[in-house]
Amino acid sequence: MTLEEIRSQFPITRRFNFQDHAAVAPLSAPAAKALTDYATEMAESSYLNGTFYRTVDHVRQAAARLINAHADEITFIKNTTEGISYVANGIPWVTGDNVVSTTMEFPANVYPWMNLEQRGVHLKRVPEEDGRVPFDRLAAAIDQRTRLVTVSAVQWGNGFRMDLNRLGELCQEKGVLLCVDAIQALGVHPIDVRAMNIDFLAADGHKWLLAPEGAGLFYCRRELIGHLHPTELGYMCMKQSFDSDERMIDLHDDARRFDSGAYNLAGLCALGASLNLLLEFGIEEIQKLVKLLTDRLAEGVRRRGWEVHSPRTPSEWSGIVSFSTDQHDLAALKKHLLDEFKIVVSRRLGRLRASPHYYNTAEEIDQLIEALPEVRT
C-alpha cells in the first residue's frame, strides 16, 4: 500500500494533524465500518443471522497472530485494568509474597497490585533513572519471595521501551512470572509472547491498535490457564450451555474461562477490522515507519531548543516523544496547536507528548516542529 492508500483508511487526516495515538486514537475506516455494519444488522435482524460470534472467533485468531500466541490463550477484556486484575486477583498468593514493578507505570498497572497489600503481598517499585528503568536494578529487586514481575512494554509518560526479551529470560531463569501491560506497544512494536517468555499480557485497543475503547485482549500462557482462578464466574465461563438445566462449575479449559458474560460485540468487530488492517500491512513495516517519523520529530524538537525526555536508543525508542521547556505555558501551547494548526498532541507529566502512527507523514511532523516556539538558550 502507498502512503496515500494508507491515509485513505483514516478519515481524521482530512481535518487534523493527529499525533496523539498514545491517548485515544481515531478509528480506522474499516473499524468504523464494522461498527456501523453491526448497528445496521442488529437494528434490522437482531441476532438472527448469527454472524457476530463467528466474527469473534476470527478476532481471537487475529489477536493470537499479533502476539504469536495460540487462539485458545486469548480472550477479550473491556480495558487493560481488567486483564491485569485477572492476574492480580487470580494467583493463589501466600502472605510474604512480593511483586516487582517500576515507578514509571500507568495507574492501571499499579492499583491492582497495591490492592494485594491487604493480603500480605508487597509491591516493590523500582525507581526510574533518567527516564528509564536500569535493568540491573530491576533484576536486583527480584528475591526468593518474588512471584511475579509486572511492567509496561512501553511507558506512557516518556515512551521508554522495556527490553522484554532480556526481562523474559531473567524471569524464566529466576522462576518468576512475567505480566506485561502492552497497550502502548501493540500496533507498533512486534511482541512475541513465546520468544519473550511472557506469561500474561493485557491491552485495550483504543491506542495504537486504532480500535474503540472497551475492546481489548488478554493473553494467558496455556500452561498457566488452569492455575489462574477466575474472579468473576458466569455462564460464558462454563463448558455446558446456558440453555441446559444442569448447573455446575465446570470451567472452559482455555482462556474463555475468564469470560463471565456477554462480549462487547460491536467493539470486538471493530477491533478485528483494525487488527486485520495492521496485520495486512505488517507490524515490522509499521515499526520502521514510526521509527523514521519519531526520529525526525525528536531531532527537530531539539533543534528548536526543547528538551526531549524520551530515550531514543535502538532498544528503548517507541512511538512516544515527550518534550518540554520552562519558557512556555504548555497547556496554552497545546490548545494553540489545536486551534491554530489542527495539530493534536497531549500534555502529560508537565511535558508535551506527541505520538504519531504509521499513516502520519513527514510533512505533518515538520508542521508540528515549525509550530513550536523556539526556546532561547
Image (tube, rainbow, N blue to C red):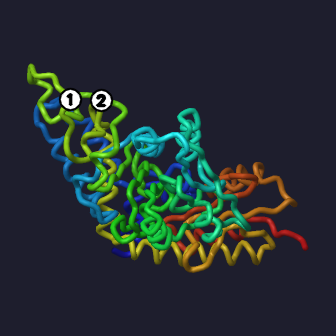
* Residue occupying the point 37% across, 75% down: 2
Is residue 365 found left or right of 2 in the rendered image? right
Residue that mark 1 sits on: 249
Query: Is residue 367 in view?
Result: no
Could you tell me residue 24's position as x and y percent? 52, 49
Density class for disc 1 (Cα within 10 Å; few <14, some 14-19, many ≥20) is: few
> Label 1 to label 2, Cα distance in Å?
9 Å
* Residue occupying the point 36% across, 49% down: 218
Could you tell me residue 333's position as x and y percent? 76, 54
Q: Amino acid at mark 2?
A: Leu
Density class for disc 2 (Cα within 10 Å; few <14, some 14-19, many ≥20) is: some
Could you tell me residue 275's position as x and y percent? 32, 58
Q: In the rendered view of the protein, which quadrant contains the N terminus?
A: bottom left
158 or 355, which lies in front? 158
* Residue occupying the point 60% across, 70% down: 135
Is residue 40 found left or right of 324 in the rendered image? left
Asked if labels 2 and 1 touch by Cβ distance under 8 angstroms, the answer is: yes
169 up-or-down from 336: above or below: below
Residue 233 circle label? 2
Could you tell me residue 331's position as x and y percent? 76, 49
47 up-or-down from 155: above or below: above
Mark 1 or mark 2, earlier in chain? 2
Quarter occupied by residue 176: bottom left
Is residue 52 found left or right of 322 in the rendered image? left
Is residue 150 found left or right of 242 in the rendered image? right
Q: Amino acid at mark 1?
A: Ile
Q: In the rendered view of the protein, which quadrant contains the C terminus?
A: bottom right
Residue 166 circle label? none
